[in-house]
Amino acid sequence: MNPRKISENVYLLGAIDWDRTLFDSLIPLPQGTSYNSYLIQGSEKTVLIDTVEPDKAYILKNQLQQFPKIDYIISLHAEQDHSGTIPQLLEQYPDAQVFTSVREKPMLTDLMPELDPGRITTVEDGETLSIGDFTFEFLYTPWVHWPETMSAYLREKKYLFSCDFFGAHLATSEMFANEDPLVLVSNKLYYAQIMQPLRNFVTKNLEKVNTYDIEMILPSHGPIYNVPSFILDAYDEWVNGPTKNEVVIPYVSMHHSTLKMVEHLMTALTDRGIQVQPYNLTVADLGQIAMSMVDASTIILASPTLLGNTHPLMANAIAVAALLKPKAHFIGFIGSYGWSDNVPKKVADMVAPLHKEPLPFVNFRGYPTKEAHKQLEELADIIQQKHQQIGVIN
Ligand code: FEO
């Protein structure tokens, strides 16, 4: 793709990664992603904001051929999908200087030892950089997504360059998000997987950027927000909004006993007006589970006992949930066993780091009996009461 004009003197560069399926060797990317760079031509200096993943460097370098001079490279975030091509660009533009946050500079040189620290200038929170007729203001926005992350506000255009913050892993040739609900699904998936664990920081950063008069938000992944309220309002709901009347049920079953328990519980919950979302962990997409955890009030884990432990797929799901730090209020466990009934105690220890109110665990030997059904219905009653207490159901 050639450089594309966003407005007078502001261009979108970078690479669309249509084929990428995984980020950080963990996060599924069902719709690929993009690495956005932005070029701003001031009356005195030309600036490039962020670069691209090194394997896409050739695309950015081709785009830059029509811009003979880059004076400044603003690096908003040290992760290589945005910073990895800086060393090559410093070779291409021997007079260019890099601007980063104070915390980012050593991270850049740690990650890319070939970088000359003498070519990196640090900026403080609130500091400005003039490029003639345009002025950037730097806002420290830590932990969206790493501790050094910052954003840049182009005052004359009222553009906020936010890097990972508000991004979407979405490969699309559409430059603007407009108010496309499909973009919002990608945003929510991205939020669920990347920003959800950092919710407290996201809240503070959201408050900070909301003090600015913003005409457009230009992230370094996905389309540009030409209607800023579209993404700002969505973030406000995901971060600060209440949970919903929903129960997410990651489950695994070996011989259908646990599956029958899940089915019975789901029926009991829906009879009580509670939404359910099961995920069979043998086939489930981790991203979809993460997205359900943005809204769910209750998490019910369902697993058989395997060699005296919960199933390894469940152990992995619990570990991921602990990383995501979902807003859910309540957590429970149901399952079946053959001869060893010590799993509930082990699961209780495993879920303790999530800091959720535990619900009664239901663990039964073999295929679920009438007594098991009765206990599952009692569990559904308790979930209904709990949801009433937190006000998500009448
Ligand atoms: Fe898009 Fe944290 O990198």
Image (cartoon, grey):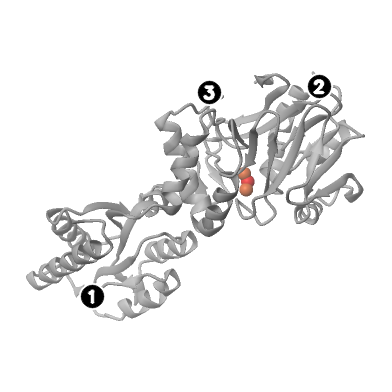
What is the residue that sits farthest to the left in this orientation? 370
Image quarter (top left, top right, bottom left or bottom right) of the N terminus? top right
- Label 3 and label 2: CA atoms lie apart by 23 Å
**141 is higher (above) or lower (below) than 12:** below
Between discs 1 and 3, the one toward the N terminus: 3
Q: Which residue is mark 2?
A: 67
Crowding at mark 2 (Cα within 10 Å: few <14, some 14-19, many 20+): few
Q: Nearer the viewer, residue 309 or 386?
A: 386
Mark 1 lies on a secondary structure that is loop
- Which residue type carries mark 3? Glu
- Which residue has dot 1 on it? 338
In this image, 103 relative to 338: left or right? right
Q: Is residue 393 above or below residue 17?
A: below
Mark 1, mark 3: which one is toward the viewer? 3
Instruction: Tell me which label, 2 or 1, sits earlier in the chain.
Output: 2
Three-letter code, disc 1: Gly
Q: Is mark 1 within 8 Å of ligand 1?
A: no
Q: Residue at x 48, y 26 (%)?
A: 178
In x, y percent, where is residue 212?
61, 41
Q: Earlier in the sequence, mark 3 or mark 2?
A: 2
- Element carrying mark 2: loop
Q: What is the number of the mark on residue 174?
A: 3
Q: Quadrant of the C terminus?
A: bottom left
Residue 312: image quadrant is: bottom left
* Number of numbered callouts drawn: 3
> Element under label 3?
loop
Q: Position of residue 341 (x, y in %)?
A: 26, 80
